[in-house]
Image (tube, rainbow, N blue to C red):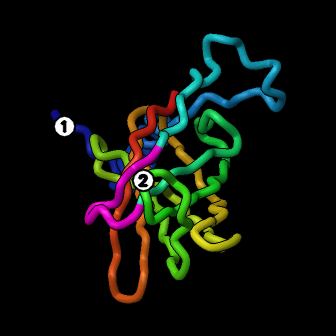
Amino acid sequence: MSIHIPSSRWLILFICVVLVGCHTTSQPEHPAEIPAATKPAPVAQPAVSETSDGNYFVNYISQPSPIPLNEMFALEVNVFRDAKLQQPAAGTTIEVDAGMPAHHHGMNLSARIEPVSDGRFRVSGMLFHMPGQWEIYIDVIQGAKKERARFAVEVR
């Protein structure tokens, strides 16, 4: 004997299963209330990444540091023409994105980029919504040429 359930009930059941599977634990409003075991472990800031064609050297500092889980953060990005980080890359722009290679997805938001000075940029609107291994992609653009710097970041 089979039981007939209308398709709308299956849809509701499916939505409930998806919502339960995507549930995230809410965090206290004040960081001091978060138990030490659940706070993100400190992550060393990447020193420097050479771009894909080797014409630029890029570094960044996150604000806050380390990069938090499921909270907005910003980057101060610096682009240089030399490995000694003494010649800012004038005349360049950047694009910034991030992704989780193991999960085949990126951020849910688009970063906003503001030039500060030659080779220096402020990037806001970044959010890593899942723990794990992320990559930050910083594309340096001059004219029609684009080169990518990659930074691996572990977010807990």
Amino acid found under the numbered disc labelled 1: Ser
Decide which of 99, 143 is in the foreground and name it: 143
Magenta stretch, residue numbers: 48-56
Decide which of 93, 71 is in the foreground and name it: 93
Q: Main secondary structure of the magenta part?
A: loop
Q: Secondary structure at mark 1?
A: loop
CA–CA distance between discs 2 and 1? Answer: 71 Å
Picture layout, residue 6 above or below residue 43: below
User: Residue placed at 71% from the left, 29% from the top?
Assistant: 27
Around disc 1, counting alpha carbons within 10 Å, would you say few (fewer than 14), some (14 to 19), or many (20 or more)?
A: few
Q: Is residue 108 magenta?
A: no
- The x, y position of residue 82, in whole percent, is 43, 60
Amino acid found under the numbered disc labelled 2: Ala
Residue placed under numbered mark 1 in the picture: 2
Front label number (2 vs 1): 2
Name the side, left or right, on which 39 lies relative to 59.
right
Residue placed under numbered mark 2 in the picture: 83
Decide which of 82, 14 is in the foreground and name it: 82
- The x, y position of residue 51, in whole percent, is 34, 60
Lower sequence index among marks 2 and 1: 1
Q: Are marks 2 and 1 in contact (CB under 8 Å)?
A: no
Q: Residue furthest left?
A: 1
Decide which of 118, 96 is in the foreground and name it: 118
State the quadrant of the N terminus. Answer: top left
Say the numbered circle drawn on residue 85. none
Quadrant in which residue 31 is drawn:
top right
